Amino acid sequence: MTHKRKGALVAAAAQRLDADDGERIEFFRGRLWIGYPKARAVLAKLERLYDYPEVTRPPNLLVVTETNNGKTSIVERFKELHPDVDDPLSDGVKMPVVLLDTPPSGDEERLYAHILKKLRPTTRVPNGKDAKLIQVERLLQGLQVRVLILDEFNNSLTGQANQRQQMYNALKGLSNGLRRPIVLTGTYQALTALRSDPQLQNRVVAVPT
């Protein structure tokens, strides 16, 4: 099959013009990256954070938009551009970008447990916030994480106010301890969470998509 505008298609789509219907349908049912201008602009900001030098108070970012408007696709694309690396000269895998969902409630201890189970599902999660924090920091440092991403940060609005505040304090502490940026994504409700903590708001730049 030949198409006059084949050259306007991305390579992955052009390669499937001559495929059978089943293969083409399967391709378009999959997750596709569409690099529209705002998405490319956010990716450029994420790349700058990735290359940012280690500092005591690194810059952080909140990618905010309406629901179902592409924020998760952007950070998933960023993760694809910086995949995990199996380093035979070290103890194991390196994860320059860690992407995970924000826990379904704002809670410091639950945040730590969520990170540990995401990255090391076979490792026993210790009891107590302090023990979990120590293990989280060691794990993220060992994986040589350059950017930690929490998707759907608006989830943190659930739970009690004191628990949410402890979680926000934990995020600030993790960013300082790792000396690396943290990226948050969420709906416009995430701005409410951000503005509830002046220190967190001072450290995080909100970027609409």
Image (cartoon, grey):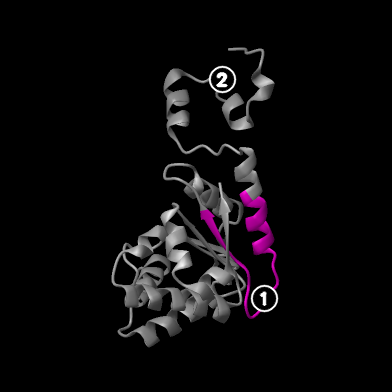
- Residue 24, image x, y percentages: 47, 24
Q: Give the label on residue 17, or none.
A: 2
Name which quarter of the figure residue 12 lies in.
top right
Labels 2 and 1 touching (C-beta < 8 A): no
Give the structural element (helix, strand or loop) at label 1: loop
Residue type of the residue flagged with mark 2? Leu
Q: Is residue 145 visible?
A: no
Residue at horizontal 64 percent and vertical 39 percent from the top: 37
Q: Residues within 10 Å of mark 1 (few under 14, many from 20)?
A: few
Quarter of the rendering occupied by the N terminus: top right
Q: Which residues are magenta?
A: 42-63
Magenta stretch: includes residue 52:
yes
Residue at horizontal 44 percent and vertical 58 percent from the top: 190
Q: Give the label on residue 54, or none.
A: 1
Question: Foreground residue, 52 or 167?
Answer: 167
- Residue 126, image x, y percentages: 33, 82
Q: Is residue 8 visible?
A: yes
Give the structural element (helix, strand or loop) at label 2: loop
Q: Earlier in the sequence, mark 2 or mark 1?
A: 2
Residue type of the residue flagged with mark 1? Glu
Q: Residues within 10 Å of mark 2 (few under 14, many from 20)?
A: some
Q: Measured along the vertical axis of the image, is residue 63 above or below residue 161?
A: above
Residue at horizontal 31 percent and vertical 64 percent from the top: 158
Left or right: residue 116 versus residue 158 is: right
